[in-house]
Amino acid sequence: MVSMMEMRETFTAVLYPFLMCAIVGLLSKVKSKEKKTFALIMILAGALELAMALYLLSCDLRGIEIRVFEVSGVGGLGLHFLYTGFRGIFAVLTALAWFVTALFSYEYMKNDTNVIRYDLYNLLTLGATMGIFYAGDLFTLFFFFEIMSFTSFMWVAHRQTREAFYAAGTYLGIAVAGGMSILMGLFIVYDRLGTLAFDAMYGRAVELMMSGADTTWLFVAAGCMFVGFGAKASAFPVHVWLPDSYTEAPAPATALLSAVLSKTGIFGILLITLDMLPMQGSWGAFILIVGVVTMVVGGVRGVMSANFKTTLAYSSMSQIGFILTGVGMQSLYAEYLMVLSGDLIGSGSETAAEFAKTFGMNMATDGTCLHMLNHALIKLVLFMIAGLIFMHVGSYDLNQVRGFGRRKPFLFVTFLLAAAGVGGIPLLNGYVSKTLLHESIAEYGELLAAAGSSLALSATPAMIKAVEALFLFSGGLTIAYMTKLFVVLFVEKNGDKKVQEAYDAKSEYASLMTKAAIGVCALPIPLIGLLPNLVAEPVAAYGLVRFGLSEQLRHQQEYIHFFSLKNLSGALISITVGAAVYFVVVRFMMLRGLSSNQKGYRDIFPSWLNMEKYVYRVVLYTAVPFVLGIISRILDSFVDILVVLLRKTVYSDRPLPHELSEGNRVTHCIGMSIERVRLLYYAVMRKEYTPKNYAHKLAMKKIDIFENFRIIERSLSFGLFMFCVGLGLTMIYLLMVN
């Protein structure tokens, strides 16, 4: 029996940050604005949120049912909250991320003039993020996703500089466009499936596919929602907000953007992939291609950047590409199983062929889940270290931060763990998840080669081989840019000897609270890597995103030998590629002479390939307004022509019985009446009468009034016309979908 407390706990975890935000707002008005006080409140808020997330996790592990909780009346559809293993893991990760960044913010934000505003929007974003991970339907997900987009926008604009506003404008523009795209997808899904609940969507989508009905509109809806979710995840080509936003936002906010908020986008993509388009290989192939392009583009930009934080930003983009690759492989495996042996799922068969098919899917799902978790932990460490460096250096330029990490053991160890972890070096967490993803690709390629051309599948052996090669190449790019950052921080010396001496003298470069925040996130990196079967597999199995597999086919992970020569060979290839890229691109192409006796790093990525500056802003700020302006003028002219035609035909003026030179009958009669009254008055008073011509004055006043009204009508006419057009199109759409 579930208590009301346990039923409400999911909603409480979402509502609590909003209540804390209200409390912080009230305290900022009635109490002293001591920054330490609010910093401690934020730490307390993060700790309580973490405690609630862990409580829910413990309830689920103990077998206590956590039922769906609903809040009716919101948006007409209500809010629905759901708890599953996958949601529980990322809710705990979210709460942990907010807690450790709150610890880090205690030192980082102590000199900030807008710390209270940052705290308010930080809490709002926390509540919205928890709402996303606990969402039980698409409407609830969309509701909190939009709140999160607008509250996190304030992170990017926090510094209130010209550069910050520029980055925030791009971030908000992409967020608004993405939100509208998601909303359109929701309309289509509700029309085609009749529900937005994830569990119900899955069943109805399967029924629709099995009946042979047209599923084109589901693909259209998925494409619309992919734009919004992919933008938040920073998938190519809607990643353009990423570099400037990450650079301008405060370091604690950047850590949350990379570690958690990007995962909300992946979470949305996972849900539409698994619940709306189950076993659709063509959709999986699309996600796979986007993932490969994202990880390659992010890796190339990361290698070529001469900015510490920008490198980490593109690193986040590249790792999102790895995760999307895992999502695509899940769909491809599901299609393979359905086409080859539709009765296999849930049958409990244990032949060698069936084992191989299911085993590959397990690796794809486990690798996706684990890499999301591993990437979050690693980026929390790296971005907090970046913030720590900025506190002392005041810049992210590689030439400025050069040599800062020398003689700093704690910084050396934690950065090395995180850098090697994201690079997929054996014995660390990134190696485990990347090995699972790589092996899922390799296994699928072998299955396709064995099947030949007998099966109609969405992927080909050549395509999978190309994906595998680019996967390993992108891993090499990761190693190259992380090696670049490591060498800059800990190996090379600053070109200015006095600056280097000042860096070496900084023995107290971080508070105990900051070190604790970084250390807590760094600790699982070697733990997961050293004990993959004891730590990683249970986590992945618990948080498995269901794909309809029976439990007896899930217990295969123990057969993975992570440190076999076959699996180590993939890491070795990536290391070799990384070493080659580092020496050719970084050491040879990026290092150039800053002066006669000093070499420095320079950004070598061609500026003309900047998509934000030369594509998106050109299209959105120049091309689109120009085209719409022309259309508006054409429509305006059409309205004017229509009015003239109507005046010349149906609404032509009738001639007056007695044509007046000016004004109309009313102004003429009133004016003449006034003149006669004046004439009578002057006659009675025996004064000399002087005509004032009131008929003319009233006629002029009438013309003036009518001209003013005409100006107003002209300014409103087009707006009213466009409103009518939009209303008509909406009515047509409603008639079509019904």
Image (spheres, rainbow, N blue to C red):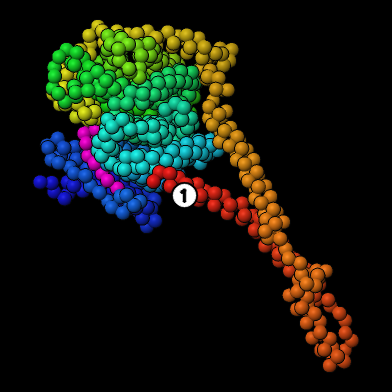
Which secondary structure, mark 1?
Answer: helix
From the image, tell me which residue sits under label 1.
731
Q: Is residue 81 left or right of residue 164?
A: left
Residue neighbourhood size for the residue with mark 1, other residues' Cα within 10 Å, grouped as few (<14), some (14–19), many (≥20):
few
Q: Residue furthest left?
A: 1
Task: Using the image as rendered, state which of residue 72 and residue 170 is in the foreground.
Answer: 72
Q: Residue furthest right?
A: 688
Task: Using the image as rendered, state which of residue 523 and residue 638 is in the foreground.
Answer: 638
Q: Residue furthest front?
A: 649
Q: Residue at x 84, y 86 (%)?
A: 679
On the image, the x and y values in percent for residue 120 come to 38, 47
Q: Residue at x 23, y 47 (%)?
A: 69
- Disc count in the image? 1
Q: Quadrant of residue 249?
A: top left
Q: Quadrant of residue 705?
A: bottom right
652 versus 583 height, above or below:
below
Which segment did they paint magenta? Answer: 79-91
Q: Residue at x 43, y 20 (%)?
A: 293
Q: Amino acid at mark 1?
A: Met
559 versus 64 height, above or below:
above
On the image, the x and y values in percent for residue 367 come to 27, 22
